Amino acid sequence: MLQSLRRFAFASGLCVIFAAPAGAVAPFNFDSTPGRLPKTVVPTDYRIALTPDATAKTLTGTEDVTLDVRRPTTRIVFNTHDITISEARVDGTPVAAVLTENEKQLTTLTLARPAAVGRHLLMLAYAGKVEDSPDGLFAQDYRKPDGTVGRMLSTQFESTDARRMFPSWDEPAFRATFQLTVTVPAAWKVVSNTPISSWKVASSKATTGALQTVTFGRTPRMPTYLVEFSGGDLASLSGVGSNGVRQAIWAVNGDQANGAYTLDSAKLILSYYDDYFGVRFPLPKLDHIAIPGGFGGAMENWGAITYNERIIIHGPTDTLDQKQRGFSTVAHEMAHQWNGDLVTMGWWDDIWLNESFASWMAAKATDKFHPDWNWWQRQAGSKETAMNADARSNVHAIQQHVVDELQADASFDSAIMYDKGQAFLRMLEAYLGETTFRSGIRAYMQAHKYSNATTADLWNALTAASKKDVGALAKAWTEQPGYPLITVTASCDAAGARTVTLAQRRFLIDGTSVGANQLWNVPVGIASGTAAPHSILFTTARQSGIPAGRCGEPLRANASDVGYYRVAYDDATFETNRRAFASIPDADKIGMLYDQWALVRVGRAPLATYMGLANAMGANRSHPAWTTIVDALQSLERDTRGTPQHDAMVAYARALVMPAATSLGWDEKPGESLETGQLRRTLLAALGAWGDPATVAEARKRFDRSLADGATLTPDMRELVVAIVAVNADAAAFDKLHALAQSTKDTILAGQYRAALMTVSDPKLAEQALQIAISPDVPPQQRSFRTRYVGAVAARHPKLAWAFYKAHTQELTAGFSMFEKMLGLSNSVPATYWDGTTPDELEAWLRSNLPPKANDYIVKGMTRARVDAAIRAHLATAATAFLAANPPPKT
């Protein structure tokens, strides 16, 4: 699963699961796998007949479940949530009692007579509901181009929401086969994990119109959370790739043609994965289903992946960045067809086996098919996101013990579970070697296909392939939080040969010393000058006498920026690197910039050291490297707002990036790379955000010209020009942008215009932008954007946005589940509004608006907010000192 906004299952009662603590990793064993459900009775096959009513938002169903009773029993226990069971029979005999405990999400059947060891048949009849948010089977409304509203149904089951649509053993170790039958309006198109096996027109009812009954083929053995059903006024675009598998892009009728880019991409990716994993995709088809709204990401249902439509539907107004993010997300979800679907983690403790691997594999695939995107260098930003989160004392490890439904959903932490996991796997692959690593992954897939696995199973496969104890090497990286700061101290002998002393200590940004004695097994890549890097495994707190080339040569202690650690060089070595910075490979520039900025933020290095690297870029045109510089400058601009140094900070930032921006100009040059175009837009956007007069004037001129002839702007330039005009808008420009958002039939383009309006600098216009955020202008499928819009206003008007958020919380969180409020609000509200009020007022508001179960998450969110405030104060002070010694040039 890849989601920018998780949807969380709600359970008012959470039961503890007794199991081995995190770190006690053993190979998968069904009987010892954690879980709430007894393993006395195991389902082997489900036949589910479902009749949803999309108008009333109700569902009825019947279910035949083939059971393997492993020990004689008088009870059968399974999961249900908001489901009422009207009939239950075992082998044709009614059960003696049905006890449904909705707060525990459990139903217990007491049998009329004991069930003997062996095969039995459970028959259930039940009723439930269609949800408004993507938890279980949900309804998604959307506005059509003609202004009318359509409705489709789809499913979102991960982590624990299959139990909302059908009674089930809703834990990942309980794999079974599934055959789904649905009765829906005859005009609908329907999609599930497998192809349709039979279809017939059902009897027509006066209240519902003509109906059809569709039965899908039986699935392979898989966990419940991968079952999928979608239906509505859908249409598809399909094709067969080189491996013979038919793939299709499904969308609301009329949008399917805009799935061509995704379809072509998916064909390439599937063939690559067939070869990489050594196991061919095992299903006869693979569908990609665009949901117009709903969740913010995607879900890897086996053979029927669901996505927010913005990910896989690319119209003529889409930018390069949207297509890049789309390709990467499709590659992520398709990687799950192996890591997660073919082989599933035994319990949610090991969800990283799904998510980290899918993120890493997606990056490999994206880099393979689009080398001109420099994708691994761009992934340095994702790694930095992980390292910023992982540098906090209250962060969790990649592997974390899950004891209830709340923690199962909370475990989908994008910074740690996705970004850190991806970065660690890249480092591990580089250390073991690409061929060896792939051999281990192939062995892992073959050994555990159609079954479950734990982290130990993966380490065993990689150990066998590499002849190294991978479990011992990797243990600290996955079972303890954080990462090391490696300090490098160089020494030179009389002949000019250099050796270095390395020391490691956990890097933290909150002033604590938690985990000060932690150690990691660190594959350190050392490179001097232009020599090829060599790797050492650094396993102790300190190690001396490591050869490191010649004195006077630039030194890289994280060669190619592959390692998941930070580096701090002694003063002399840092200065050597600064002088040679323009000649250092781009990947190393990016790593050094990120590391030095992190050291500046925590007060371990003066701001002048970072600015020294930034000013040493010279004529280099690495987009990822310049992005790190722009991000740092934007942070300093924000942190100095309201201080006497703000104007000087803006002037310094403009002066630093202006030469590069001027050399690129506004217009594409023949033969230039995609990266050059991206860099141009990044630099001009920064200058526009900082109010550079010439940049703003040129953007306004191009915007006015586009009003008469839209073809004068490409999608990428339109996004840039609109962003600059919006942030600097007066009332007339604001009204023009709003009118464009209201008049276009393209809902995605309208959303781009609305998002731009939220960045306006003028506080009076920002008040208007906030009203737009909750107005009927926002179509049903973009309802979740409302909170993002208000959050965007907070970037420039924190107090205004916070007051608005408090006044409109109910509207902004309409449709959120209780778990989403507990996990989402306790994190996002402090992260977004920490500078819009005092920490005490913010914490008091959270406690008054969230239930007691959210306490631990509130504490975590508020700790982050207080640390961020302290970093901001430190950077403002650092900027004052730096600008006093380095005043910006006068213009």
Image (tube, rainbow, N blue to C red):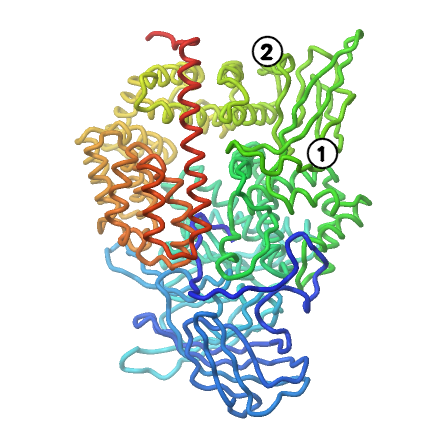
Q: Quadrant of the C terminus?
A: top left
Residues 803 and 610: in front is: 803
Earlier-in-chain disc, 1 versus 2: 1
Q: Which residue is mark 1?
A: 523
Q: How many marks?
A: 2
Q: Which residue is mark 2?
A: 579
Residue type of the residue flagged with mark 1? Pro
203 horizontally vs 46: left or right? left
Q: Tell me whether circle 1 and circle 2 mark residues in contact (CB < 8 Å).
A: no
Q: Quadrant of residue 226?
A: bottom right
* Residue 483, visible in the rendered structure: yes
Q: Quadrant of residue 879?
A: top left
Q: Is residue 452 above or below residue 360?
A: below
189 horizontally vs 65: left or right? left
Residues 185 and 553: in front is: 553
Label 1 crowding class (10 Å Cα cut-off): few <14, some 14-19, many 20+?
many
Question: Depth-wise, is mark 1 or mark 2 nearer the camera?
Answer: 1
Residue type of the residue flagged with mark 2? Arg
* Residue 372, visible in the rendered structure: no
Mark 2 secondary-structure assignment: helix
x 37%, y 40%: residue:
832
x 69%, y 40%: residue:
428
Mark 1 secondary-structure assignment: strand
Q: Position of residue 804 (x, y in %)?
A: 25, 43
Distance (Cα) linking label 1 and label 2:
27 Å
x 33%, y 26%: residue:
689
Q: Is residue 195 above or below residue 687?
A: below
Label 2 crowding class (10 Å Cα cut-off): few <14, some 14-19, many 20+?
few
